């Protein structure tokens, strides 16, 4: 029996249930079960070869040491140029901070503004790390309820009505995980206009799925609103767009006042990002983008397949996902809770999904399906689930 005494705040730190489901699915596969994984949120494509070769070349060229804490200057310049090309917004490379993935930006932003007595608004259902780190910081998490009837887009009026003098940070995410929801430009315009009355509120805009939109939708980046740039933190990266989840490479654009703080956090936390991965990141942004377009087209075909298939299942209905690579069907008609459905589909069907409650209390009655899998496997998974639902 250990006598170690752990810090109390560790009890407030949650987890990401998709990885728990992934572990359970892996164990079942090791036992010989045929498991179709529609749970984990990562592209099933290989990183494009020219990006891989750039990483290998960097290692062979001797780039084995530390880099600046905020990232290689050439990479920060490439990020700034890419953002201006895609969003039409000029970005100072000095405001770009390169980090190992998307989560460090969330962690740093929330720790920067979160403390006892503070409030932080976040989407619910939403990426579980938001609420987890808010609680860890000691701040009060204030959920922004995302509704099925609104296509899981946030309501600007609802968000603005929840802001108080204690609100320090507002987190938004579009296209969204876990719902695939995309907030329309008119709603974002209304939010930004309303934020003029709340100059004390910083904004973290998680735009990691910014290049994964369907049916002619165009991404609206908060970088395009100069009136909030002095308090905007924009999160993006390489993981989803370039199928580079394992490279651990992300970035954020920070307001000038926050740069000294985030630089110190980087130095204290991870020193710098892997050098070879950063060289690969430069080539990803400056090289051919054909692989990105091909991957998004494949996701679009899968999206149509899974949404149609889920809507044909008894007790389910599924809103058409506008972005990312997730479907978030309503399962209330099955009579099961989200966790019951997740467990049944994994244990009896061999299909890994994630309960909606893994993404917050407002996710009850829903399941997240990741369609980062082949059309063949998606069809097989839908058939298996259908057999179980029809036979129950």
Image (spheres, rainbow, N blue to C red):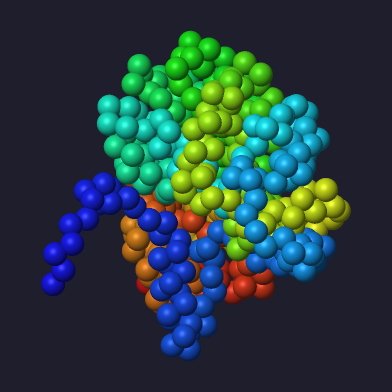
Q: Please tell me which residue is depicted at 51% across the width and 17% down the height of the picture.
A: 195
All told, the count of numbered labels is: 0
For residue 152, side relative to residue 98 (left or right): left
Q: Please tell me which residue is depicted at 46% across the width and 14% down the height of the picture.
A: 198
User: From this viewpoint, is residue 79 visible?
Assistant: no
User: Residue lying farthest top?
Assistant: 197
Please state, as top left, top right, bottom left or bottom right, where the C terminus lies in the image: bottom left
User: In the displayed structure, would residue 273 be above or below residue 2?
Assistant: above
Where residue 239 sits, quadrant-wise, is bottom right
In terms of depth relative to the viewer, which is nearer, 286 or 88?
A: 286
In percent of width and height, residue 108 lies at 47, 40
Please state, as top left, top right, bottom left or bottom right, where the N terminus lies in the image: bottom left
User: Residue lying farthest bottom?
Assistant: 32
In terms of depth relative to the viewer, which is nearer, 23 or 281?
A: 281
In percent of width and height, residue 4 lies at 18, 62
Q: Please tell me which residue is depicted at 59% across the width and 45% down the height of the picture.
A: 69
User: From this viewpoint, is residue 314 visible?
Assistant: yes
In percent of width and height, residue 15 lies at 38, 56
Where residue 54 sits, quadrant-wise, is bottom right
């Amino acid at each position: 029996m250990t006598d170690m005494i752990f810090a109390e705040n560790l009890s407030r730190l949650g987890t990401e249930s998709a990885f728990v489901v992934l572990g359970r699915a892996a164990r079942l596969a090791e036992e010989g079960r045929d498991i179709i994984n529609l749970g984990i949120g990562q592209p099933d494509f290989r990183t494009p070869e020219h990006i891989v070769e750039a990483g290998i070349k960097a290692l062979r060229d001797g780039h084995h040491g530390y880099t600046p804490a905020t990232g290689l200057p050439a990479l920060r310049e490439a990020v700034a140029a890419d953002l201006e090309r895609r969003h039409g917004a000029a970005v100072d490379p000095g405001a770009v901070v390169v980090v190992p993935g998307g989560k460090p930006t969330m962690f740093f932003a929330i720790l920067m503004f979160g403390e006892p007595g503070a409030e932080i608004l976040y989407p619910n259902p939403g990426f579980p790390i938001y609420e987890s780190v808010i609680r860890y910081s000691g701040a009060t998490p204030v959920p922004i309820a995302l509704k099925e009837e609104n296509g899981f887009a946030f309501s600007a009026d609802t968000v603005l009505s929840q802001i108080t003098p204690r609100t320090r940070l507002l987190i938004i995410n579009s296209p969204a995980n876990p719902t695939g929801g995309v907030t329309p430009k008119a709603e974002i315009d209304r939010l930004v206009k309303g934020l003029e009355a709340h100059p004390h509120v910083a904004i973290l805009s998680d735009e990691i799925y910014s290049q994964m939109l369907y049916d002619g939708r165009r991404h609206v980046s908060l970088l395009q609103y100069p009136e909030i740039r002095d308090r905007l933190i924009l999160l993006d990266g390489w993981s989803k767009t370039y199928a580079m989840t394992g490279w651990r490479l992300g970035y954020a654009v920070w307001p000038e006042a926050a740069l000294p703080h985030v630089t110190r956090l980087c130095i204290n936390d991870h020193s710098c990002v892997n050098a070879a991965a950063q060289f690969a990141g430069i080539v990803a942004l400056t090289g051919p983008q054909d692989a990105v377009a091909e991957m998004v087209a494949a996701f679009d075909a899968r999206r149509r397949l899974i949404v149609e298939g889920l809507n044909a299942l008894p007790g389910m209905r599924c809103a058409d996902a506008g972005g990312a690579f997730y479907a978030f069907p309503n399962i209330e008609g099955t009579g099961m809770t989200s966790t019951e459905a997740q467990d049944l589909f994994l244990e009896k069907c061999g299909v890994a999904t994630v309960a909606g409650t893994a993404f917050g209390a407002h996710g009850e009655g829903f399941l997240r399906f990741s369609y980062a899998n082949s059309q063949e496997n998606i069809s097989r998974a839908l058939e298996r689930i259908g057999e179980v639902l029809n036979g129950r």
